[in-house]
Image: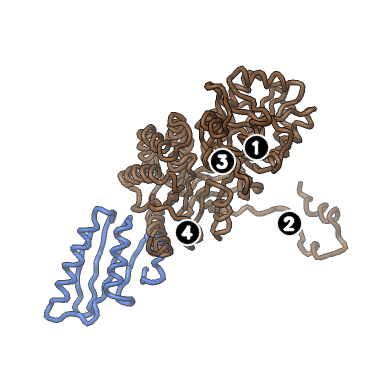
Chain colours: A blue, B brown
Amino acid sequence: MINISYNAKDQIMSCVFTGHLGADHSAEIIDAINIKTKEVKNADNPPDALKIIFDLGKVEFIASSFIRICISTFKDVGKGNFSIINTKPIIKKTFAIAGLSDDMNIK
Amino acid sequence: MPNIQEYANEMMDRANMAAAVFNQLGQEQTDKIVENVYKVGFNNRVRLAMMAHEETGMGVWQHKVLKNVIATQLLYEDIKDLKTVGVIDSDEITGITSIAQPLGPILAVIPMTNPTSTTLFKVLISLKSRNPVIISSHRKAINSCKETVRICYEAALEAGAPEDCIQIVEEHSRELTHALMAHPKLALILATGGTGLVKSAYSSGNPAVGVGPGNVPVFIDKSADIPFAISSIISSKTFDNGTICASEQAIVVEKEVAENVRNEFINQNCYFLNEEEIKNVTKVCITEETGNMNADIVGQSVNVIAKKAGIIIPEETKIIIAPLKGIGKNYPLSTEVLAPILAFYVAETYEDAIKQCIDLNYLGGIGHTASIYANDEQRIKEYSEIMNAGRIVVNTPSSQGAVGGLFNSLNISFTLGCGSGGKNITTENISAKHLINIKKVPAKRENRNWKEFDVNKFLDEGLNIDDISKDYYKNQ
């Protein structure tokens, strides 16, 4: 459901999601992101400005809870440091209806 | 409520998020949600009816149970096979494919007369069309509406509906309702209520379907089965003490059968008021300053109204009837009264009777509902053609007939479109099919006449339509 990796050179944390991201998965996703973020920030060489990418290439459905995770992550890292990539058209449209496309870098 | 606009923004943000998630659901999932919600609504039909009756002090709880059944079981039968997701129609001949897309967040304003049934109805048609809905209840029915929303929302979530797909304005506030109505993220207002509320909906700047008052004339033709007609009218006008806006308001008969009709009403336990009693009943039923019905008598029984008016009627009386000499503001009981009270008119001729029905129709119920009892097909046709009503019910109790499903094949609805007369875009019974945007995908089908015609000929002022037609339609 979520696979997180960190590229210290580019200071980019990539979160690759798969499947159906329903409300029942939100706690698990938040925990995984928090743990990894803490680990990255507490590393010997912490990033000046952490960038986070959500890769939704293999995601079929997102619930409101996942959209809230996107909003909260976006607020944490700031504009320009967050992006969502590889969305399927239906997911792209979901973000558009939610009115988030203008602020977030959603591709 | 600390800040009304902030509260409205929060509700609309949540609704908008739900709309976004709803957009991903397929037909099967959507139908599963609707099925779950209708079942829970049906299973709670008695409890919700009792709550509504106790809270509002209106109507008859047993009839409210039936309304809840109509708004769940019968509505479900009506909409369950309706396609509301993806391709909903494809016409080989025209080459047009129709694709459904949800509208977005809907604000559903609920009246105190039918609170739980209207909430169930609006929730189900919204969910069927994948639209989140915000319920704004009349202040006197807020607890029964909250409970209805609570059970529906739980059932919807259990079936996989998006969070916040159903919300309710927790504390009634006119200002908040107006803020929601005017909110830029709102897609549609489904407003059922008084004239003021409906006007607010239309002036909000958002699309609205507003259903205001009706003033249903009933023409009993001499060809009608009179005992049957009277029995049918009584069953309709006493249903939930007349709280349905499609209930009969005035009876119009020709002189020739007037006595017969009058006697039949009396035989079936209706009471005709004398002039003095009409004055007393008018005082309690109509607010003198506004000319509108007094909210305190809405949905009350005849005995309660008679007591308020200080008149004595037989205990078994079902309806009180006011024989009136005219229609309009000088005859206040010629307007809508949502209680078991009818106006009664005797016309000299058939034409006079129809003209009185037109006056009643245009007095306050344009586009709503009209009723006729007749066995003369020609007269039914004439009446139907001349009345300005979205539904003309024939030999049918108009309350139950207008909402559809029981006596005819009209779509089940607690929101009756009133056409342009009622400032509506449609005269249909509003249902799930009205809550989707239908996208058209036209396959290429070239107009052969146009294609094979020299369009420069249109530029020649010397050619008239006959000259052009000869050439334009040459292949036909």
Mark 2: give few (<14), some (14-19) or many (20+) Cα within 10 Å: few
Mark 1: give few (<14), some (14-19) or many (20+) Cα within 10 Å: many
The residue lying toward the viewer, choosing from B193 and B311, is B311
Q: Position of residue A30 (x, y in %)?
A: 22, 63
**Residue B175 marker:** 4
Q: Amino acid at mark 3?
A: Asn
- What is the spatial separation of the Cα atoms under label 2 and label 3, in whole angstroms? 44 Å
Q: Amino acid at mark 4?
A: Glu
Residue B145 visible in the displayed image: yes
* Residue at 48% from the left image edge and 54% from the top image edge: B103
Residue placed under numbered mark 2 in the picture: B452
Residue B23 versus residue B242 in the image, above or below: below
Mark 3: give few (<14), some (14-19) or many (20+) Cα within 10 Å: many
Residue B27 versus residue B380 in the image, above or below: below
Residue B129 visible in the displayed image: no
Q: Earlier in the sequence, mark 2 or mark 3?
A: 3
Q: Amino acid at mark 1?
A: Leu
Is A55 left, or right, of B204 in this rendering? left
Is B26 left, or right, of B422 in this rendering? left
Q: Nearer the viewer, mark 2 or mark 3?
A: 3
Q: Position of residue B29 (x, y in %)?
A: 37, 45
Residue placed under numbered mark 1 in the picture: B333
Chain of the residue on which disc 1 is drawn: B
- What is the spatial separation of the Cα atoms under label 1 and label 2, in whole angstroms? 65 Å
**SS state under label 2:** loop
Disc 1 to disc 2: CB gap under 8 Å: no
Q: Earlier in the sequence, mark 3 or mark 4?
A: 4
**Residue B429 marker:** 3
Q: Nearer the viewer, mark 1 or mark 3?
A: 1
Q: Nearer the viewer, mark 1 or mark 4?
A: 1
